[in-house]
Amino acid sequence: MDGLIVLNYKTYDETTGDKAVALAKLCDSVSRETGAKIIVAPQFTDIYRISREVSIPVYGQHIDDIKYGGNTGSILPEAVKAAGASGCLLNHSEKRLKLAEIDAGIQKLRSMGMVSIVCTNNVAVSVAAAALGPDYVAIEPPELIGSGISVAQAKPEIVSGSVAAVKKVNPNVRVLCGAGIAKGDDVKKALDLGTEGVLLASGVIKAKDQRAVLLDLVKGLR
Amino acid sequence: MDGLIVLNYKTYDETTGDKAVALAKLCDSVSRETGAKIIVAPQFTDIYRISREVSIPVYGQHIDDIKYGGNTGSILPEAVKAAGASGCLLNHSEKRLKLAEIDAGIQKLRSMGMVSIVCTNNVAVSVAAAALGPDYVAIEPPELIGSGISVAQAKPEIVSGSVAAVKKVNPNVRVLCGAGIAKGDDVKKALDLGTEGVLLASGVIKAKDQRAVLLDLVKGLR
Amino acid sequence: MDGLIVLNYKTYDETTGDKAVALAKLCDSVSRETGAKIIVAPQFTDIYRISREVSIPVYGQHIDDIKYGGNTGSILPEAVKAAGASGCLLNHSEKRLKLAEIDAGIQKLRSMGMVSIVCTNNVAVSVAAAALGPDYVAIEPPELIGSGISVAQAKPEIVSGSVAAVKKVNPNVRVLCGAGIAKGDDVKKALDLGTEGVLLASGVIKAKDQRAVLLDLVKGLR
Amino acid sequence: MDGLIVLNYKTYDETTGDKAVALAKLCDSVSRETGAKIIVAPQFTDIYRISREVSIPVYGQHIDDIKYGGNTGSILPEAVKAAGASGCLLNHSEKRLKLAEIDAGIQKLRSMGMVSIVCTNNVAVSVAAAALGPDYVAIEPPELIGSGISVAQAKPEIVSGSVAAVKKVNPNVRVLCGAGIAKGDDVKKALDLGTEGVLLASGVIKAKDQRAVLLDLVKGLR
């Protein structure tokens, strides 16, 4: 099955501690039942627990641009990997990074054999991020963020234009759709427009029936 | 036995993943053998593992001033607690915080039943921190940082003066000595000067024989 | 005449370039006519111009904790002084500083013969700031910020309690009231409650008749 | 005459207040005598004074990503322009910006009719910056920073490779050489390798004879 669903846990009550583990087990179960590729990105404190309990990939939400040494309170890339993560988000809109940090983060993740997903906010920034050679760019078109407009309803060129621009600067970079995703139809539309998956959070996390939402989203995959 | 040894793990190779757990077990073993009160402050990714394996308290190295919600890549206080931490460092010299964040962090930790240790760099800042009412202030006199001068060799008033100034503004705040500690004699001297313990890192972490250093430090306790 | 009015220019259209100079001249004129002590705190780019055109004191809005050297794009304290400023705000709610930076800023300003005003957000933080020994603490009680409640209408103990707490830790620190000030009555009330002046911004800057508002505020002074 | 010399004032004693003005006058004088295009980038506090005294372009060292409003202590782009700047550095190694801030800064400067110079630290980051469409990218190859190796001595492909990579992603972006420049020979070599000028600082600022160094640098222009 093609297409990828990345679930960013953020720092919700529903994604902390035991509840974080339970949600990961749910994703793991849906993944096994349907064959869908689902990735969870929990908080740092929960990566170890979750990676011991599920078979699906576990990603970090961020790494700091630091090396082994005196960096009290910072996020060491090697520690995120040691806890069980096999990839990491970078430059999420809630944790924007300096340009040089994004470059260093991508290189560091690659050197550790980890997958990088760089989040971006418009076409120009997506192209700039793609020039740095990450595995994925997750685009969050401002037209779709918090607008209530799903990607299936929006003008198609918003997403397809971004994909084209990214591929032009670096054809190896894959694109995820990071906004306007709530249902299986949105996932299907995002894939139709050239992305290779979606990045989402509250749509699943805050759902009364998380399992039902996950199953619906998976229907949009191929 | 009086006196407290807080071991800040920072982000060393020797304090990441399996090695972080092994060092915590060593501290746990020394604590049980000697009755010494030892606390470890590992990286966020290792708090859960370590808190399951040892009986000594486990502290966080930092918390962000955030609430449940959309804060990708940040450190949620509730997540640090859920992982097993019972206290936390704040404002370490490698993770300085805004004044209002220190205030918020102390209040948050207290509301969760967790112990707060605020690190400071001189007498004036120690007094300011004490005015915020944390459980501990850990003073790092600049005269002792990286100078190779141990607290046992330094002018006594450097530490005793800080203790007096802190107690004057808030007698309930306890003081730790956060620099110039390498041996049991330094721990003894720090306690003689009015502190109630020490905060240290590389002296133990980078030691060829971590156990021997811990046992020597413990001798300085009463 | 007792009491002080500090006008924080922030970064409004009405406080940029020529308009910034015009507003300073207006304050200068009102000050000369009434004998009121008024201070303006314009943007860095306008300090030089304004200090050449008016007799009233000109303050900076911020300084960075840096020394002469390679700090492209940062605010050198010596440059703010060289441009004509005789004092500076520190830790404004829109430019919160680390605890150690506030300490360093106060010391730096004092060493250059400049006046320091540290902004704070509650009683505990005001006391902590006072412990650092600035010339002024400007308190912004959360109950008064953006609430539409003027200091004249609020419970008196909100302000008088802060003044008492500050004076207890350091009687030499003077207190300004930094919120809930719109009219002369508010200024009078703030002084009655033990402060030695007010810090305000949009109430004057955004007024249709800036001169009328200034003249009304001045009536509250003694 | 082709080629451009941009003098970043940073925050030196020699580039603060009256000395900042004197150095600008010197650059102005050398520019008029030789026809060389020289640009100075002084501190915010000195932009107004300098722009009134010289005919050469004056640039800012940084702008914050803010709009008119409540941003105490920040650098409003409109204020930098109002003071007399006609261009601005962005993302200097001493003031690194988030990727989205660089994008916003370039757009903002363009909308105000100002020139943008984005500083970068390696080929990948230079290409990413070029994708954002600034007027100039100023590359600082790590091999040349603080190494004592001048661009004239270094392997030519370090600079020419960066120029080629930038031009490939956006042929309209011009390239400056931002490291390894001390003499006229270095300027000449930088131009030979495809750049359109140089960005330098202490080589001129800290020189015993600033005029002699400027005159030598100008000889490298065409």
Image: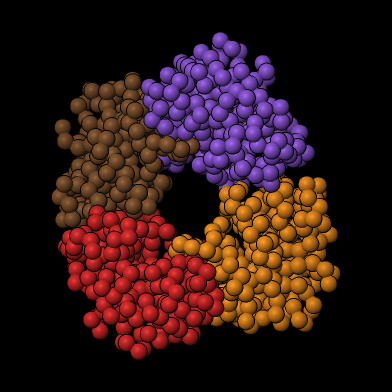
Chain colours: A purple, B brown, C red, D orange
Horizontal side of residue C72 vs B13, given as left or right: right
Residue C52: x %, y % from top left: 49, 85
Q: Quadrant of the N terminus of chain D?
A: bottom right
- Residue at horizontal 41 percent and vertical 40 percent from the top: A73
Horizontal side of residue C204 vs B107, given as left or right: right
- Residue at horizontal 26 percent and vertical 73 percent from the top: C185
Residue D175, picture quadrant: bottom right
Residue A200, picture quadrant: top right
**Residue B84 visible in this rendered orientation of the protein:** yes
Q: Quadrant of the C terminus of chain D?
A: bottom right
- Residue at horizontal 42 percent and vertical 77 percent from the top: C210
Residue B97: x %, y % from top left: 38, 49
Compared with D106, D14 (above or below) is: below
- Residue at horizontal 70 percent and vertical 80 percent from the top: D55
Along the line of sight, which residue is nearer the eye, B101 or B19?
B101
Residue C151: x %, y % from top left: 26, 65
Compared with C141, A60 (above or below) is: above
Horizontal side of residue B68 vs D53, given as left or right: left
